[in-house]
């Protein structure tokens, strides 16, 4: 069972990376990438903080090399991805905490870390240390809202817990709907 769960986690990670690479330039607002934040939060909830960090890093590297995106693709993603997963686990499955982790990690920490990289490494002029904060926070709020509705729908139907269980992850959903589904599908688990 553990070997199957590990393979499934790797397949889901690959799927999340490919979705992130494909949808991030399509559904993009100048200076914001809300779908990257959506992917970060969904990956954090389904796979956990370390897979989410790997997913964000892989998406960022692929976007930088193949699409010419500046290092903001990394600095604007990795902090939120890992913090989203950590806060989700610490809160024992609170979706709002996962979104708050993405907003703080990307919208504040990632935005502030982006300033010295863009200003001193790439030589962009006219930037301040708060330059990226407004657009990063707006992007995380848009992506976080979409992720919240998506994950809430999965949780309401019991699919979120089923996905987490199949991937060998932590299941925090203890709703009646999930418990009924668990009893009905006893042989599946």
Image: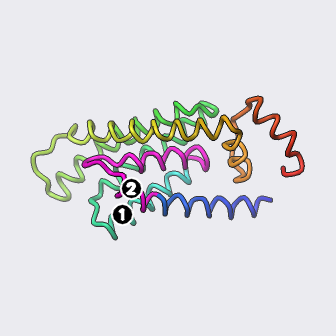
Please state which of residues 111 and 43 is positioned toward the viewer in this rendering: 43
Helix, strand or loop at label 1? It is: helix
Residue 106: image location, x then y, percent: 38, 42
Mark in the foreground, 1 or 2: 2
Q: Say whether disc 1 or disc 2 marks the residue closer to the N-terminus.
A: 2
Local crowd at mark 1 within 10 Å, few (<14), some, or many (≥20)? many
**Residue at left 31%, top 41%?**
136
Could you say which disc has been placed on residue 63 in the image? 1
- Horizontal side, residue 87 vs residue 130: left or right: right
Furthest residue in direction right, as rendered: 187
Q: CA distance from mark 1 to mark 2?
A: 9 Å
- Horizontal side, residue 93 vs residue 139: left or right: right
Which quarter of the picture shows residue 143?
top left
107 is within the stretch colored magenta: no
Contact (Cβ within 8 Å) of mark 1 with mark 2:
yes
Relative to 23, is 83 above or below?
A: above
Q: Can you identify the residue that label 2 sits on?
A: 24
Examine the residues drawn in magenta and state their main secondary structure.
helix
Q: Which residues are magenta?
A: 20-49
45 is within the stretch colored magenta: yes
Which quarter of the picture shows residue 123?
bottom left
Please state which of residues 188 and 59 is positioned toward the viewer in this rendering: 188
**Residue at left 31%, top 67%?**
67
């Amino acid at each position: 069972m553990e070997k199957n769960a590990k393979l499934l986690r790797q397949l889901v990670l690959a799927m999340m990376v490919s979705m992130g690479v494909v949808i991030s330039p399509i559904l993009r607002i100048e200076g914001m990438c809300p779908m990257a934040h959506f992917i970060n939060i969904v990956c954090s909830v389904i796979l956990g903080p370390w897979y989410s960090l790997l997913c964000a890093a892989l998406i960022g590297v692929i976007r930088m090399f193949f699409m010419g995106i500046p290092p903001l693709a990394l600095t604007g993603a990795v902090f939120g991805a890992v913090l989203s997963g950590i806060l989700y686990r610490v809160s024992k499955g609170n979706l709002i905490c996962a979104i708050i982790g993405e907003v703080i990690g990307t919208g504040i920490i990632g935005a502030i870390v982006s300033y010295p990289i863009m200003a001193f490494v790439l030589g962009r002029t006219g930037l301040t240390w708060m330059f990226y904060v407004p657009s990063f926070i707006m992007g995380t709020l848009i992506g976080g809202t979409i992720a919240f509705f998506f994950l809430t729908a999965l949780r309401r139907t019991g699919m979120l817990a089923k996905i987490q269980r199949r991937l060998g992850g932590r299941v925090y959903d203890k709703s009646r709907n999930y418990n009924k589904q668990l009893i009905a599908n006893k042989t599946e688990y």
